[in-house]
Image: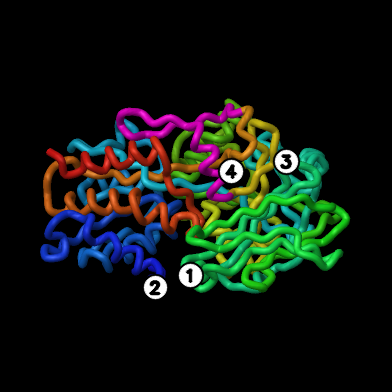
Amino acid sequence: MQKLRKPIVAIALALVGSLSTGTIALAESASGSGATFPQNFLASATVAFNSATGHNVTYANPGGGSSKGKSDFKAGLTDFGGSDSAVTTTQAASFDWVYVPYVAGSIAVAYRLDEIKGTTLSLSPATINGIFGGTITKWNDASIVNDMKTNPAWANSQKKSGLKGASSVWSTPSLNTTLVTVTLIPSVLKSSKGKTVELYNETKKKSVKTAKIGTKGQIAVTAGVDIANTYSVKVAGKTVGKYAVTAVNLPDKAITVVFRSDGSGTTNNFCNFMRNAANSDWVINDAFTSCVPGGSAKVASFGSTFQGQSGSANLSNYVANTNGTIGYTEVSFVTDATRAAKGIQSANVKNAAGKFVGPTAAAASAFISGASVDATGFVTFNFKQATNTAAYPVVAMTYLLGKTAKSAKSAIVSDFATWMLSTYAPASADSLGYAPLTGAMRTAGLAQAKKINSK
């Protein structure tokens, strides 16, 4: 579990008064397991909640994947479950329970390809389908080449951020416009508050645009750029990224696809995107070898070019450690400083409006704005948002599964879910690489949280 940072403690302590009466005097424990997608978020959230309340809420690290979260919860091994995907009839517990959507995030199409020297790949759903479906096997395939031709190929030559805990995502909404999103982890956000994020033209030696750092962990800067110039992204005067348009020579190199080998909600959501945005032959469930067209026999025929890894961290580590690989994982596992220094990056993905967009919290929120939530609290995404130019289209909603029956443990679980939605996620989700729920979606989540411990 990650060490709690001081600003998170301060946020947590500010909420003590809004928690259930007597929670500090009557300390309780509650445990959960499951989805690894929200692992980085929950690692901090549980510690902050416990510091504020005196309770001991824990979430298994690693969580075991969404399928394990459902099975542990059904078997009564945990007090709450973690899942990024729907609970099927066979997975459902016999006792009464509810979904609580509490935070979302982008699923990065993560890759390491040293030969292109920091260039951000731009990939369409059709090309992603070909790669993960096993029909595109080389990095210099015409489909990848053509995708790269439709969007300026900006490369980040700053392999290691000059400010640890700060990272940048560069995307180009149009030919001569950039959208730079800087993410600051909580400790860096605190130390940098009041300072500036700056887009600096290195060629002309002048500042292009600045933004003041406030309380949000992701800061977006949009500005006009000249593709003939080089630009630095600076936080408090330190360079976290240096970008220039580069001629891309994609190598004649085999692609190694890395997929989740465990029962995974991230897989479920990735397959949901593939089926709805690219190829209806994909199936939606928690197992990649069942999702992919052709199933497990097809994956087996690909041999060593397809590698399974259990959990978000292991998949991300494999990609970060291995040149020529591509996989899918929550974006915070990619922006992690240790992995990023090894060369792992996130592709910009073409959305239904025809724009290549990076996996930021704001872009995930834009996509979620077109989603719907039903009476059970389960969210359905709309992949046909043809006018939503800001949306990043590969997103997961993560859920807490809670029991409605009254008990001391369920009371704590209800408080924990409410606290994440109302206070912790709005304050900290974006700095941890996630998207807080807002508006009607957050209202629905809070209503679901109240159903826990209600009967």
Which residue lies under the disc numbered 3?
136
SS at circle 3: loop
SS at circle 4: helix
Calculate the distance from the C-alpha at mark 3 to the C-alpha at mark 4.
16 Å
How dense is the environment of label 1, judged by Cα within 10 Å: few (below 14), some, or many (20 and up)? some
Name which residue type carries label 3. Answer: Ile
Instruction: Nearest to the eye among marks 4 and 1: give it.
Output: 1
Which residue lies under the disc numbered 2?
6
Name which residue type carries label 1. Answer: Lys
Which of pointers 2 and 4 lies earlier in the amino acid sequence? 2
Residue 363 is one of the magenta-drawn residues: yes
Calculate the distance from the C-alpha at mark 2 to the C-alpha at mark 4.
48 Å
Calculate the distance from the C-alpha at mark 2 to the C-alpha at mark 1.
9 Å
Q: Is residue 429 left or right of residue 335?
A: left
Name which residue type carries label 2. Answer: Lys
Q: Which mark is residue 342?
A: none
Instruction: Nearest to the eye among marks 2 and 4: give it.
Output: 2
Which residue lies under the disc numbered 4?
300
Which of pointers 3 and 2 lies earlier in the amino acid sequence? 2
SS at circle 1: helix
Which residue lies under the disc numbered 1?
190
How dense is the environment of label 4, judged by Cα within 10 Å: few (below 14), some, or many (20 and up)? few
Calculate the distance from the C-alpha at mark 1 to the C-alpha at mark 3.
44 Å
Residue 11 visible from this viewpoint = yes
The C terminus, quarter of image: top left
Asked whether disc 2 touches disc 1, contact meaning CB atoms under 8 Å apart, the reply is yes
Instruction: Nearest to the eye among marks 3 and 2: give it.
Output: 2
Asked whether disc 2 touches disc 4, contact meaning CB atoms under 8 Å apart, the reply is no
Calculate the distance from the C-alpha at mark 3 to the C-alpha at mark 2.
47 Å
Residue 109 picture location, percent across and down: 61, 48
Q: Is residue 22 left or right of residue 400?
A: left
